[in-house]
Amino acid sequence: MNPVKFSRFVLRSHGTFLLALTALMLVLSTIGLYRGTGPFAFLHADPMVDVGLFQAYSLMMVVGIALWIGSLQPNPWAWDVVGLLAHVSPLVANFMFAEPLAEIGLPSTVPLHTFFIAVELAALGYYRYSRYNQ
């Protein structure tokens, strides 16, 4: 497969996943905040926490849009770096706050963030490999 096509596929898949997941998380956190039900029911008792969640999910939605825009560029490989870096902060946060997240029953997202970092690295590696082996 052409490395540009592969990069575009990765970016569009990643962007679509981010858009869908962040939209779902925004809805679930809002339900938790106002109704006190669902996986984010704890937000009802501490609404200020949702300020950070709302911002984080909204920013990841912007990243999803950026990845789609990047997939339309002539050299989309640079946008794979954006996709990779978008997962570094949440991955680090998972390790830093593993105990409090577990205490409130939220699952670890380490596998998810590690997966997307690996996929973006694969796209970058494939691009670099094919460029130097022509």
Image (cartoon, helix red, strand yellow):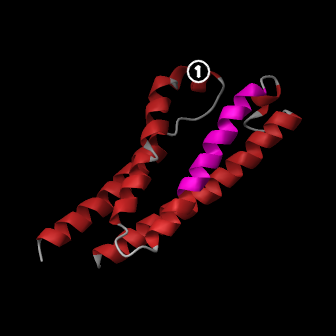
Q: Name the element at disc 1.
A: helix
Q: Which residues are magenta?
A: 47-63
Residue 54 drawn at (x, y percent): 69, 40
Specify whether residue 50 is painted magenta: yes
Q: Is residue 123 above or below residue 73?
A: above
Residue 92 drawn at (x, y percent): 43, 32
Q: Is residue 18 above or below residue 114?
A: below
Q: What residue lies at 52% left-to-right and 67% top-to-bottom?
A: 68
The secondary structure that most of the magenta stretch takes on is helix
- Kindly indicate the quadrant of the structure image that contains residue 48: top right
- 127 lies left or right of 118: left
Name the image quarter holding the C terminus: bottom left
Residue identifier under label 1: 100
In the foreground, 132 or 110: 132
Q: What residue lies at 32% left-to-right and 63% top-to-bottom?
A: 123
Specify whether residue 53 is painted magenta: yes
Circle 1 Cα neighbour tier, 10 Å, few/some/many (<14 / 14–19 / ≥20): few
